[in-house]
Image (cartoon, grey):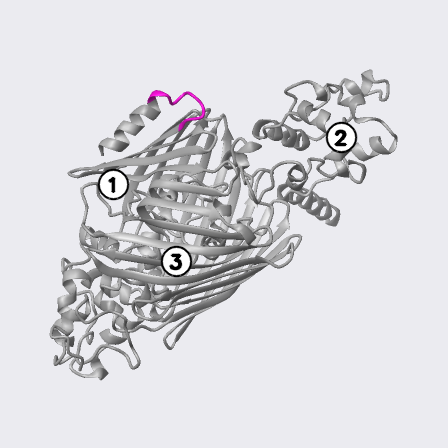
Amino acid sequence: MKLPVAMLGVLSATASAEPLRLRADALATTEAPAGLLVLEADGQARENVSAEAVVWMAGAEDDSDGDVLVIAVRANALSGRANARLGRFVSTLGALRAAHVDGGAFRVRLPQRFDLEAVAGIPVMPGLGTSRSWDWLAGGRVSRQLGDSGSVGVAYAQRRDVGMLVTEEVGIDAGVEITKRDDVGARAAYDVANPGIAEVMLTASHRGKSLRSEAYAIHREASHLLPATSLFSVIGDVPSQRAGAVFTWRAAPRLDLIADTGARKIDDDYGVELVGRARLRLDDRGTSMLGGEVRRSGVADDEWTGLRGTARVALGRGFTASTELELVIPDVDRGRGRVWPWALGAVSWECEDWQAAIAAEVSASPEYTGRFDVLGQLARRWGRK
Amino acid sequence: MRRWIIVCACLGLAACAGILGFKSKSTDRFPHRAHVVKGISCTRCHGDVGKPGTKVHIPEEATCVVSGCHDKPQPVSAEAVARIIEAQQYLKFDHSRHLTKANNNCMRCHAGVGDSDADIRPPMATCFKCHESAQRGRKCDACHTSLVEEGTLPATHLAHDGDWMREHGARASSSGDLCETCHKESFCASCHGVNVPALPAQRRFSDPFRPSVHRAGFVARHSLEARSDPGACSTCHQPEMCTSCHTSKGVANNVRGNPHPAGWVGLSNADNRHGREARRDPASCAACHGGAGESLCVSCHAVGGVGGNPHPPGWSSNQPLSAMPCRMCHPSGAVR
């Protein structure tokens, strides 16, 4: 805890000087009751060296906690051919799952449009005092660029907890812009520890003048996403699949209509995924906006129907009123109530570098028949350009 | 009566057209093309564009009259002016530095000004003809002061429309470096960080349009969503997260009794549901029975136990029998 606090002290002392930027967010809720303070800072020491940190502290009635979410230094070669990160960050290696690590990573652009990236470190465990020996993660990815913004790559990563193999995966990813309006993306991860496909995702989209359409398919085997040390990874699993298409139509300059039509399959059970959504901007920038959504989702006994309404209206002088209403109607209530409503009403204010919001949240769920909560937020920014 | 209905309908349609954003284009944009066609030089109106520090130049309204061309100023819509002011606010640009290098030829960048009155701001590709290419540098802040506050999204296939929450996983896997041009480390960590204190939608509760998979009453419906999409939760979360939350809320560790229905564990396959359900979503079982709780399974499924072999036909593993979890059932290293 000493390191981030010291770093924040340095940052806040020079918060008003460019290019350092600092943001502080304080949140409070009455139901728990609980409070949360999040401090974010980022800055550029030199043209090719930047740093970023996010730390938080939370307190409840009889408990308090704090942790470092991100604290990383990034250096770029001035030619743009290499960059490196050091500290706590989220590592992404192509098709492999994102990992939160304390360590280092680098990326080098090689000749013939090849890229090499590697990461090594200790997987982050929640809590500042948590530490275990012989925990590490290492992996790498080799990729080749295709066109202006596409690439194809192969990645490998291995993770160990207390010396035991937890994850060993190989992934293949590809993203290609076929034409200016058509592109495809795909990723597949293969579990090497318990051989089998862990996850496959495919997506293809077409952008017309006012209509964007996307087809997608997902195949997932849940046991391969568990740590290899888990007993539940050895029972084999039933793959689940989901496929469908999403259409986003700009019906009018300020009106978007979105439809998601899909199907799910788990074992012998089939289900549909139908979503209809509308978004109406009340001004050209979308400062004020209305939204509505109808959803039919789930499989077998877990199917449900949902309705949602959202609104955000700029009141002037930096004030904005917003509301969000949701109604969930499960097909099988299991004695937990036929309807699960949720509603939130909020007023926010933004002026220069200050931001404040207060909201009331009301809900009923399978867990409780009624709940009322008041949420408050105060944020301040320093050093914004 | 019919006339009134028609009048009301027309008024209603006009109002709807305004709300939906339909508008006449006649006054939306300045008629640049008409001026170019008449051979009027750019600097006749934009005379001050060469002054150092000039970002985007808007002539004074009086220029139209003072120049002796018009009796009154040319009308320009408030939206067009707002776009120019936005560019002044969010773009780092100095016309004076570019004029010299372009030999005072405005058309070198504003090539489309003679073709139409559409937005004459040059596309980014025009900048890259002279400046460092997007592939090599990708430094957005070389020109943009803040992409987040500007609200600018890439105009390519990566525009974040559709169901981006679901789509981003496939896209980011092959274009992670492209994501980094706009998003900082904290952006990924705000969802994928294992010690994240509150998700973005919870921290920005006053913005109901902020995309999130954990929107609104997610706490109430998360069990339905988890069972309908096995493994989806574990793509980001560790199973321990379920356990810790369920324990603190009192819905696990037998605080509220057995959550399983009758017939969950029976003596024969006919009255035995837990095997099928466990294969269908093992992460759900691991959420409560992971770690030390696994001994519950091993009490029946150990080698020689009444539960028999839990592996499906054709199952294999590269793990040695001495490693966890194999040694829980195969303590002697024997394979039955």
Q: Residues within 10 Å of mark 2 (few under 14, many from 20)?
A: some
**Residue B129, percent from left and from top:** 67, 39
Stretch of the chain drawn in magenta: A13-21
Kindly report which numbered mark, 1 or 2, lies closer to the viewer in this rendering.
2
Find numbered disc 1 in the image and state the secondary structure of the residue it sits on: loop
Q: Identify the amino acid type marked 3.
A: Leu
Residue drawn at (44%, 67%), measured in percent from left and top? A242
Residue ID for mark 1: A31
Q: Secondary structure at mark 3?
A: loop
Mark carried by residue B106: 2
State which quadrant residue A189 falls in: bottom left
Q: Is residue B201 above or below residue A349?
A: below
Q: Mark 3 vs mark 1: which is more N-terminal?
A: 1
Q: Which residue is mark 3?
A: A96
Q: Badge 3 sits on which subunit? A: A
Q: Residue furthest right?
A: B38
Q: Which residue appears at 66% of the width and 33% of the height?
A: B79
Name the foreground residue: A144 vs A380: A144
